[in-house]
Image (cartoon, rainbow, N blue to C red):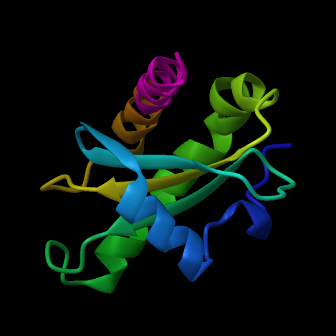
Amino acid sequence: MNKFYKEERLCSKKSLDLLFKKGSSFLLYPYRATFVFDAQSHKFPVQIVINVAKKRYKHANDRNLIKRRTREAYRLQKNDALYELLQNKEELLLLGIQYVGKEIYPYAFLEKRMAQLFKKLLTQINDESH
């Protein structure tokens, strides 16, 4: 179940516009997370998009390295930290994770930060729903 399926990626232009125009966001260095719920049919409880700014990282291999590390940290932790707690929601969570760090961090640091990001995301969702 630790796979990262195509259906989990946020590709729809309409959904991306909704996420970045109406979504709530918070900063947990080196990530900025933006999220919004959308009432559409879904196979998975979350769809995600990962961004790394071309302005900050000019070389594609640097951007790809950061995206690979971030995607791997997400893939390994999503089931325990995110999916189980969102299983009872009828809506689809659209999640955007932007890398805003000024340097390329090792995977262990990014993995820890991803776990903290999930905790903060769930508290934000619970605060908004009450």
Which of the two residues, 108 or 4, is positioned nearer the viewer here? Answer: 4
Q: Residue at x 72, y 30 (%)?
A: 86
Residue 37 % position (x, y)? 59, 46
Which of the two residues, 23 or 55, is positioned nearer the viewer here? Answer: 23
Which of the two residues, 82 or 26, is positioned nearer the viewer here? Answer: 26
Residue 59 % position (x, y)? 24, 84
Residue 53 % position (x, y)? 25, 72
> Where 48 falls versus 74 (above or below)?
below
User: In this view of the protein, can residue 35 be seen by the observer?
Assistant: yes
Q: Residue at x 63, y 34 (%)?
A: 77
Residue 86 appears left or right of 117: right
Q: Is residue 118 highlighted in magenta?
A: yes
Q: Residue at x 80, y 39 (%)?
A: 90
Q: How many marks?
A: 0
Q: Main secondary structure of the magenta part?
A: helix
Quadrant housing the N terminus: top right
Which of the two residues, 128 or 79, is positioned nearer the viewer here? Answer: 128
Q: What range of the chain is rendered magenta?
A: 117-130
